[in-house]
Amino acid sequence: MHMDKAKKSTKSVGRPKKYDIDTKEVEKLAAFGCTNTEIASFFGCSKDLISKKYSTNIAKGKDAGKIRLRKMQWNAADRGSVPMLIWLGKQVLGQTDKQEVTEVKPIDDIVFDGI
C-alpha cells in the first residue's frame, strides 16, 4: 500500500521569531540617515518589522541627526565659513543674491550716431 506524504506548509506555525533589536541602536542608525531597509538588514529582520514596531525610534533618530547636522552648520559659520554663512543667511534670514536687471532693447530700437 502506497501512502502519500503530506506536504509541509511553507508558512511557519507558532510564535514569530524574536529579534534582539536595541532601540538605541535603531535610533543611532536612523540618525546617520540609514533607511528602514538598511536598518532591517543590520538586524536581520524585515523592513516591515522595523517600520511598524520601531517607527518612534526611527523618527527620534532622524530628528537627532538633523539636530547634529544643524549644529555642525552653525559651528562652521561661527568659524567663518563664508559659504555656510551665505547659505544660512538665505535659509534663516531670507537673504537673496542681488541681481541687477538691465533694460534690453530690440535691435531695431538702437540708434547708432555718427555711422
Image (cartoon, rainbow, N blue to C red):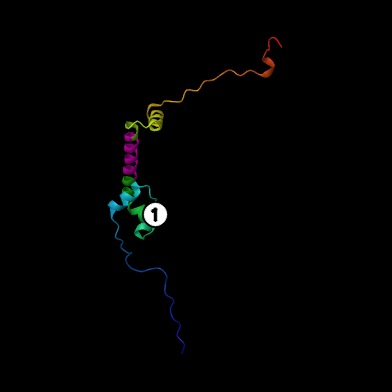
> Which residue sits at x=34%, y=45%?
62
Which amino acid does the dot numbered 1 rest on?
Glu
> Which residue sits at x=33%, y=54%?
53
Q: Viewer-proximal residue, 34 or 60?
A: 34
Residue of label 1 = 38
> Which residue sits at x=37%, y=52%?
51
Q: What range is drawn magenta here?
A: 62-75
Residue 19 colored in magenta in the image: no
* Quadrant assignment for the C terminus: top right
The relative height of residue 2 versus residue 46 in the rendered view (above or below) is below
Mark 1: secondary structure: helix
Residue ranking furthest to the right: 115
Residue 112 point in image, percent of width and height: 68, 12
Name the magenta segment's main secondary structure.
helix
Total labels: the figure holds 1
Residue 29 point in image, percent of width and height: 34, 50
17 left or right of 110?
Answer: left
100 left or right of 35?
Answer: right
Q: Residues within 10 Å of mark 1 (few under 14, many from 20)?
A: some
Q: Viewer-proximal residue, 77 or 67?
A: 77
